[in-house]
Amino acid sequence: MTKNYFKYAQDVIDGKVVCCEYVKLAAERFFSLMEDDKYEFREEKVDVVINFIKILRHYTGRHAGKPFTLQPWQEFIVASIYGFYVKEDGSRLVQSVYIEMARKQGKSALAAALSLYHLIADGEMNAEVYLAANSKDQAKISFGMCSKFVKGIDPNGKYLEAYRDSINYDKTLSILRVLAADDSKLDGFNASMYLLDEYHAAKNSRLKDVLQSSQGMRENPLAIIITTAGFDKLGPCYQYREMCTEILKGLKEDDTIFAVIYTLDEGDDWKDEAVWVKSNPNLGVTVKPRYIRDQIQKAVNNPSEEVAIKTKNINVWCDSETVWIPEHYLLDASKNVDLEKYRDYDAWVGIDLSSTSDLTSVSFMIPTEEKLIWKTYYFLPEMSLKEKRFKELYGEWRRQGCLIVTPGNVTDYDYILNLIMDVGQILRINNIGYDSWNATQFVINATDNGLPMEPISQAIGNFNRPTKEMERLLLSGKAIIDNNVINRHCFRNVVMARDKNGNTKPSKQFEEKKIDGVIAMLMALAVWLVSPRYGDFY
């Protein structure tokens, strides 16, 4: 008999389950890992976890007193986490889990059940399981579920002792504890497993980092993040989500991470009842269509509630402004770009110089017969890594190798000039577009080195043509932007400024919404558009 999780994954791929692209990619990845010679899939390990959960009993609602029966999508999650093992050393493959969906789907109950499994049955002596969240109150939601499950399986407290914020399992000297980001003391941990709840509300990644760093001595560590969508795309949750979507898309590789995101696809109407199941996999089980319908009507009647309802009930990340280029076009355009492949090709360059201590971007644009290709570099002075608002974001970009960090507290323009000269040994640089403001000395040095410099005023009229052309190229699939997370970050932050003549130019709503890379790309495109070679592309 085919296991439910196999059938669910196949039904997703075959289109028998209504779901978004990210769930389909997770299902495809599931079967791909099964075919990987480095790993083996152990059904018996999955069965152990599923059977453990079955001994738990619901304690509220119409299912009170009944066994915890997993839905097929929940079994798929369990199988994806606990089924794969590394042949080389027999360790469990998955170490980090990201689960995102709308509220009232039973994800917290599932996570609580898995936390108890790690406390009782995962095989670790002296296990330390942490239920973590941004506040004590939030963390205690999952803990309350664990406590009630414990009372159901050990009502006399023979093996499991439940206290106000901890549960002890004496047989293996293991403990489950509540932990919050606002706790005064965050150290001394040796976590075997931790659950991080509603990560979208986290202001920073400190709690996650502390728990993750504590797992180094564990044989089979596991970290589970469960969350709904939010609206802070500069926060740690969205940055982590971004990495997960890139793994699902095949832009990054990390088999130790399992991610499943139940959300809408680009172009779906969030008010259309037919698509709600994409972000509500338990629709009709733990949440009724009428409830969603009522919430949608509230948002229609009171637009001030729209963001809250879209994020919580439809699981759509929101911005206050309309996105210029939809996410899936950016992901489709993102490719690894090796400049050596284009040796001796003509190139045009755009430079967005920072004033002192911010991002500086240099973008090389290479026209080919079929597409325009951008390779963009980002520079940041070392002292800016300590800037409080962006410390974690810049630090992550540096760890990923996306940033070139220059010494001191201001950007060293010599590094930028040297990079351009080095690339000029590979590509034939035809022209370099730059903003003349605060660039006098840089331009003098560049000109002395034989580089062709072209000033571009930041007036909206100068950006209208390249902006519309960039949009056309991305939407038609004729643009490639190198696979750098900062590129996509910059594109997501763009809002459109318009004048009375209908001219448009990328702008940003707030200072922290960086768009430097987009500006550099557009300046490269601008100097190319006025070149005689422009027609060769068409």
Image (cartoon, rainbow, N blue to C red):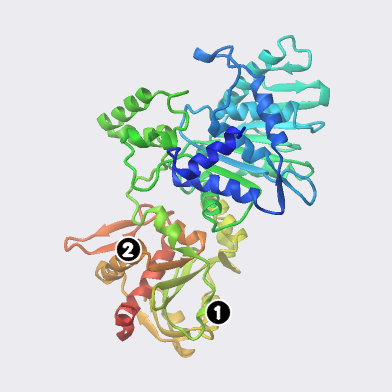
**Residue 262 as seen in the image, left or right of residue 54:** left
Residue 94 in view here: yes
Circle 1: residue type: Glu
Q: Is residue 337 above or below residue 161?
A: below
| Residue 302, x across and y down, in percent | 27, 30
**Mark 2: secondary structure:** helix
Q: Nearer the viewer, residue 190 or 416?
A: 190
Q: Which residue is mark 1?
A: 340
| Residue 437, x across and y down, in percent | 37, 73
Residue 145 picture quarter: top right
**Residue 162 as seen in the image, left or right of residue 14:** right
Q: Which residue is mark 2?
A: 471
Circle 2: residue type: Glu
Residue 182 in view here: no
| Residue 80, x across and y down, in percent | 62, 40
Q: Crowding at label 2, few (<14), some or many (≥20) Cα neighbours within 10 Å?
A: few
Q: Nearer the viewer, residue 30 or 210?
A: 30
| Quadrant (top left, top right, bottom left, bottom right) of the N terminus | top right
Residue at the spot 58% in from the left edge and 16% down from the top edge? 58
**Mark 1: secondary structure:** helix
| Residue 94, x across and y down, in percent | 67, 44
Residue at the spot 51% in from the left edge and 48% down from the top edge? 25
Residue at the spot 73% in from the left edge and 28% down from the top edge? 119
Q: CA distance from mark 2 to mark 1?
A: 27 Å
Residue at the spot 71% in from the left edge and 49% down from the top edge? 39
Task: Evaluate if marks 2 and 1 touch, with contact meaning CB atoms under 8 Å apart.
Answer: no
